[in-house]
Amino acid sequence: MSDDLRITPQAANEGIRRGDTILLDVVGEAAWRSLREVPAGSIRLPPEEAVERSDRLPRDKSFAVFCT
């Protein structure tokens, strides 16, 4: 993976505070049901729906993608 596609937790947090980065949670359905909590403000996009729902994501933001 190219380094320009990676982001540190600190950089993600700074982007979220500035309002130009969104947390995108790509956890699958089975794992989602077992979670106790998720990061506040994150958007959930299950992997199996990523292609069909990607057009609904803001185009003017960066994304910090993670899997809880």
Image (spheres, rainbow, N blue to C red):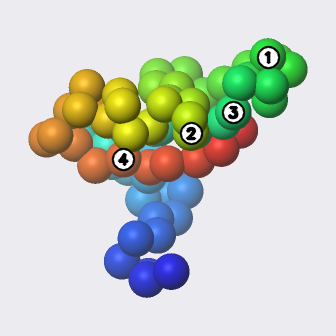
Does label 2 or label 4 sit earlier along the sequence? 2
Does label 1 or label 3 sit earlier along the sequence? 3
Task: Identify the residue under disc 3.
Answer: 28
Disc 4 residue crowd, few under 14, some 14–19, many 20+, Cα 10 Å: many
Q: Is residue 67 toward the left or the right of residue 46 in the image?
A: right
For numbered disc 1, what is the local secondary structure? helix
| Residue 41 x %, y % | 46, 22
Task: Identify the residue under disc 1.
Answer: 33
Q: CA distance from mark 3 to mark 4?
A: 18 Å
The residue closer to the viewer here, 45 or 7, is 45
Does label 2 or label 1 sit earlier along the sequence? 1
Q: CA distance from mark 3 to mark 2?
A: 6 Å
| Residue 61 x %, y % | 22, 42
Q: CA distance from mark 2 to mark 4?
A: 15 Å
Task: Identify the residue under disc 2.
Answer: 47
For numbered disc 2, what is the local secondary structure? helix
Q: Is residue 20 visible?
A: yes
Task: Identify the residue under disc 4.
Answer: 63
Foreground label between 2 and 4: 2
For numbered disc 3, what is the local secondary structure? loop
Q: Are marks 2 and 1 in contact (CB under 8 Å)?
A: no
